[in-house]
Structures are given as C-alpha cells and as structure tokens.
Image (cartoon, grey):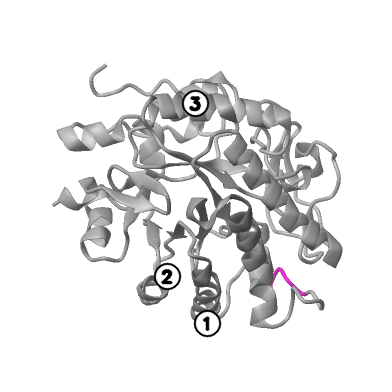
Amino acid sequence: MLDSLWTPTVAGKISLPHRLAMSPLTRNRATPEGVPTELNAEYYAQRASHALIITEGTQPSDDGQGYMATPGVYTDEHIAGWRKVTDAVHKADGRIVIQLMHVGRISHPDNTPHHRRPVAPSAIRPAGQMFTASGMQEMPEPRALTTDEVTATVDDFRRAAAAAIEAGADGVEIHGANGYLIHQFLFPTTNQRTDQYGGSLDNRIRFAVEVATAVADEIGADRTGIRFSPGNPFQLGDLTEDDTHELYAHLVRALAPLDLAYLHLAHGGDEELLHTLRKIWPTTLILNRAGTDIATRAKDIDNGIADVVTVGSLALANPDLVERIRAGAPLNTPDPATFYGGGAAGYTDYPTHTA
C-alpha cells in the first residue's frame, strides 16, 4: 500500500530519494538574536532521512519576526548559524530548504529586535494573544505598510533567499499561508488598501507574485517553493477567506509561468479546490493533509493528487520516521508540552526505534 512513498522524484533541481517530507514547524530554539545553534543542527540532522526537510519559519527581516527565539536569515550571524544546520543535514545525506516567513501583524513588539509596532497590509488589529517573555499579551494594531515599504519588503525576501543559499540551503520555501503577511494581502478582511496592492483580485495577489518572482530571479525558480493554506480553518488572527476557489485558482495560474520547484498546500478539506489547483499547477505539488495517517497520505500520491506528502508532529516525535515506517515499527507519541519549551526536551531526545 505504501510502495508509492518510496519512489524517487524531484522538486525543481532538488532530487528526492522518496516522497515523505518534513513540514515546517515552529520550534523557538534559536538564540534571542535569531541565530541557529548546534542544537538546531542536531535536531534537523536527526531527521535527514525525510525526502526533504522544510525548516521552521525564518524571518527575512527584523519586521518579519513575530515569535520568541525564531531564526532569521538576513545577517552574517544568521548565515553562519544556518551553515551549521545545512552542513549537518547534508553530512547525513539529507536535503533542506529554509522557509521564509514574514508574520506581518501576527506579532508583538516585545518579540522583535527593534520593539516597533508590527506591519501589515492594513491597520487591522488581529484577534488573539501572543506569548512574550512577560507572558501572554494582546497583539496590537499593526501599522499599514506604505507602497514603498511593500516594495522594500519584496527586496527583503530576495535578500533572505540569497542568504539562505549562501548558508548552504538547497532552496527556500516562501510562506504564504496561515494568516501571515503574504496571506494577509490576499483577502479583504486583512487588506483594505487603495493602492496597487489592494481592491481587485489582481491587486491582492500582486505581493505574493512579486515575492515569488523576486526570489526565483535571485536564486533560481528551480530552488524556490511556495506554501498556501486554501480554505484551511487554521488561519491566525481571525483572517477569514472569501471566494477561495476564485482567488486561489487565479493566484496559482499567475504563479504557474514562473515554473517554481513546487507548490506546498496545507489542505483545508476542500477536495474540489485541491483538484482544481492540482490541474493548474505545472510542477511538483507537495501536500500536507494534517491529522491523517501515513496510508491516507500515500493515497494522494497513488491518485496523482500529490507528488510528495509532508508530515508535521509525527516528524517531531519520530526523528527516524522513515525507518520506522519501512520497518513497521511503532511510533513515538508527540508531547505538545515541549513543542515551544526550549532546550533538548521534546526536541532532540525522542528515541529511535533501534535505541
């Protein structure tokens, strides 16, 4: 039943030995300055047998940070820290792309290097609280980016992509999902702009397309992926989506000519939309069907809906997930209490099935 998982494939120029990849998962274990450490290198190297590691969300700028102890990839120190990670993964015969994540309004000044208000397409305050060093706090109303600042943010993504390649990554994934900045531009609930980035469908997808184009121009389309979460109920900050069929079909059609390495979809349950996007997208489609077992995910490969499937918490708790599945070994149970706790607990200390 799982034979399709173990066939080789490609994502752009990245050759994959099989089709079970690791999803991006926020872990909050970088230094306060956003520098990955030896602990991060050990964590990712442990999971190198996945077909592809997509790293945790990594901010492309000071403004892009929303959470405590998340990594950046825009300074020399960040590049040196990520080089430890990529070297460790490659030494273990793995492949790794760094996910570029600008959180936009999903932030708090206490969590950023400059302690300024978050930025967003429009000054619309998100619902919810943010964990900070002093505890949970309400997220403030963000400041709307000027038109020039939107252009500068596109350049931030470009420079961060170049930094990721300098750090030894095999590519990057652009985070356009889950209520973060690129996603915030897509829908009127978070984008009420009156310039060329707001209003019409073409205007609301413009930022996403410009970011993808800039990154692809900088590092090559064959090393650039992008992630969306169409119709997914897990959208941070009370972002709501309207006309998802029209918008995402339009967006994916606009991105298709770029010939990016892959499209990564966090499936929200709309099977019709998933099939539509599969037909439109010309290259590798990676699918995350959260909460389902491995056999269910493998069926998407069998049916041609996905070329590669990703796993999240299963990869956290089972660094040797690929080996366990091949051997029919039992799986470790993830411990949510350790997901964002810092340190090795629930990070590098999960046992392997041969331990």
**Alpha carbons under labels 3 and 2: distance apart:** 32 Å
Judge left or right: residue 169 versus residue 64: left
Considering only vertical position in the picture, is 274 above or below 327? below
Q: Amino acid at mark 2?
A: Trp
Secondary-structure class at tag 1: helix
Which residues, given as a range, are shown in magenta?
188-192
Q: Amino acid at mark 3?
A: Asp
What residue is shown with label 2? Answer: 281
Q: Could you tell me if residue 187 is visible in this image?
A: no
Q: Amino acid at mark 1?
A: Glu
- Which is closer to the viewer, label 3 or label 1? 3
Q: Which mark is residue 246?
A: 1
Judge left or right: residue 122 versus residue 218: right
Q: Earlier in the sequence, mark 3 or mark 1?
A: 3
Judge left or right: residue 41 versus residue 142: left
Q: Majority secondary structure of the magenta segment?
A: loop
